[in-house]
Image: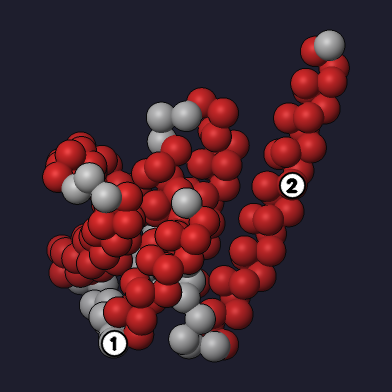
Amino acid sequence: MKVEGEQNIKYKNFKYFFIFLLLIIYESLTSIYLYFSPLFGVAFYFIIKHIYDKEYIFRLLLAFLYIFVIEIDKGFIPLSFLLFFTIYYYFIMDKIERFFNEKNYKIFFHILNAYIGYYLINLILAYLFDFELPSFDIKYFFYIVTDFLIAVVLF
């Protein structure tokens, strides 16, 4: 009986790794087609939604790895997402979860905070370490709306 369950887990992990590889290809296309959303907000909300679910550990690791790839590709400071996520998790996440009752409001504000908060963390770190300052273009508002619509459909 265990063998069947282990095969099912291996199949699921393979399936999610394949989806991860497709997302990496998609993410590389976002560098060519600037109005393709990098799906940062969707990955962030996925992490928020499943952070307490032990069944999602492999998928959460893939989501963190995907965000790391976004950091590298988009010129953000590597691993700054971990700092942002730690601050968000301990100081902001529960307040949003308690303040909004409607799921769509929660999704929207988590994604909005993901883009703006992550940008601010990178701005502060760039200032402190004398790196090039990241830019926040109008396309990020398009990304927020796109990611919100995708997250509402997926979650």
Q: Find numbered disc 1 in the image and state the secondary structure of the residue it sits on.
A: loop
Q: Residue furthest front?
A: 102
Q: Name the mark on residue 18.
A: none
Q: Is residue 146 above or below residue 87?
A: below
User: Which sits earlier in the primary sequence, circle 1 or circle 2?
Assistant: 2
Residue 5 percent across, percent down from the top left: 78, 21
Task: Name the residue tied to disc 2.
Answer: 15
* Image quadrant assignment for residue 93: top left
The residue lying at 60 percent from left, 80 percent from top is 29
- Answer yes or no: do the residues labelled 1 and 2 have beta carbons within 8 Å? no
The residue lying at 19 percent from left, 48 percent from top is 100
Q: Answer left or right for 111 relative to 14.
A: left
Q: Is residue 113 above or below residue 139?
A: above
The crowding category of the residue bearing disc 2, from other C-alpha atoms within 10 Å (few below 14, some 14 to 19, many at least 20), is few
Q: Find numbered disc 2 in the image and state the secondary structure of the residue it sits on.
A: helix
Nearer to the camera, 123 or 63: 63
* Image quadrant assignment for residue 75: bottom left
The residue lying at 39 percent from left, 52 percent from top is 45
Q: Is residue 124 above or below residue 132?
A: above
Which color scheme did the rendering employ for the protein?
A: secondary structure
Q: Quick one: quadrant of the N terminus?
A: top right
| Amino acid, disc 1 | Ile
Task: Name the residue tied to disc 1.
Answer: 138
Residue 115 percent across, percent down from the top left: 29, 66
Asked whether the viewer can see residue 72, the reply is no
